[in-house]
Image (tube, grey):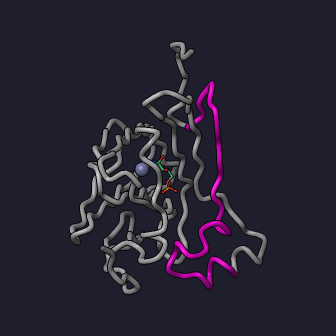
C-alpha cells in the first residue's frame, strides 16, 4: 500500500531524503552529446572524467507521480555548457514540470515541427514542458543548477531521437552569459 510521506529536498545541493534512486552522468557517458568530442576524449584521457550532472529520484510502483531532482555542475566543453542529454517522452501525451531551486540555467525545448523555445531557469521559476516537446537543461551559471521535476512515471524517455539528430540549437558561453547558435550537425527529425 502507498502511504503519504514528506520528502526533504535541499535546494542548494539537490539532495533528497528519502529517495529511491540516484545516477551520475560523467563526460565519458556524454561523449557524443558535446559538439567537440575530441576535447571530451582528451579531457577524459588526462584523468578529468568530471561528473556533468546527477539525478536523484523518488519513484513508487503503482503511483501516477514520479519526481526528483537534477543537479547540473558548472562547466563547459569548448564553450558549450554542461547540459543533460535531452529527450522526448515516449508517450507523446505526457508533459513535465521543472521547478528551479538554485543556480542559473536555460531550458531548451523543440517540437517535431521545427520550433525552438527557451525558458530561463532561475530560482522560483516553474517551467511547463508541454507534451511532445524535446527538453534539455543547460547550466549557464557558475554554481550548481538544481531543479525539481515531476512527471508521469509512464512517460518514458526517448533518448534516441536527440542522440541521433542532436537539437537544432547549441547553447554557448558568451561573456558572462550565453548565446544560442544553430547546430551545424543537426540533420532534422520527424
Ligand atoms: C528529467 C531528466 C533529467 C536528466 O528527470 O531525465 O533532468 O536529463 P536526461 O534524462 O535528458 O539525461 C526529465 O525530464 N524526466 O522526464
Ligand atoms: Zn522529461
Which of 36/33 is in front? 33
Query: Residue placed at 63% from the left, 25% from the top?
Result: 18
32 is within the stretch colored magenta: yes
Which quadrant is home to the N terminus? top right
* Residue 171 screen position, x and y as percent: 38, 69
Residue at 54% in and 82% down: 36
Query: Does residue 39 belong to the magenta stretch?
Result: yes
* Up/down of 79 relative to 137, above or below: below
Note whether 105 is above or below 27 in the view shown.
above
Q: Left or right: where does residue 35 sit relative to residue 31?
A: left
- Image position, residue 57 (x, y; %): 57, 37
Quarter of the C terminus within the rendering: bottom left
Q: Is residue 157 left or right of residue 26?
A: left
Q: Nearer the viewer, residue 81 or 5?
A: 5
Residue 37 at x, y percent in the picture: 59, 81
Give the magenta range. Answer: 14-41
Q: Is residue 184 above or below residue 181?
A: below
Count the marks: 0
Amino acid at each position: 500500500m502507498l502511504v503519504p510521506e514528506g520528502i526533504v529536498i535541499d535546494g542548494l545541493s539537490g539532495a533528497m531524503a528519502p529517495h529511491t534512486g540516484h545516477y551520475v552522468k560523467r563526460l565519458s557517458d556524454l561523449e557524443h552529446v558535446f559538439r567537440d568530442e575530441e576535447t571530451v576524449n582528451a579531457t577524459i584521457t588526462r584523468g578529468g572524467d568530471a561528473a556533468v550532472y546527477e539525478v536523484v529520484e523518488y519513484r513508487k510502483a503503482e503511483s501516477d507521480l514520479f519526481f526528483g531532482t537534477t543537479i547540473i555542475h558548472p562547466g563547459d566543453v569548448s564553450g558549450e555548457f554542461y547540459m543533460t542529454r535531452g529527450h522526448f517522452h515516449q508517450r507523446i501525451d505526457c508533459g513535465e514540470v521543472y521547478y528551479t531551486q538554485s543556480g542559473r540555467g536555460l531550458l531548451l525545448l523543440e517540437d517535431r515541427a521545427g520550433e525552438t523555445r527557451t525558458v530561463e531557469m532561475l530560482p522560483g521559476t516553474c517551467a511547463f514542458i508541454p507534451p511532445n516537446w524535446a527538453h534539455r537543461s543547460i547550466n549557464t551559471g557558475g554554481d550548481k543548477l538544481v531543479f525539481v521535476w515531476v512527471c508521469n512515471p509512464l512517460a518514458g524517455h526517448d533518448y534516441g531521437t536527440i542522440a541521433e539528430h542532436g537539437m537544432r540549437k547549441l547553447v554557448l558561453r558568451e561573456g558572462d552569459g550565453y548565446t544560442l547558435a544553430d547546430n551545424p550537425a543537426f540533420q532534422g527529425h520527424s
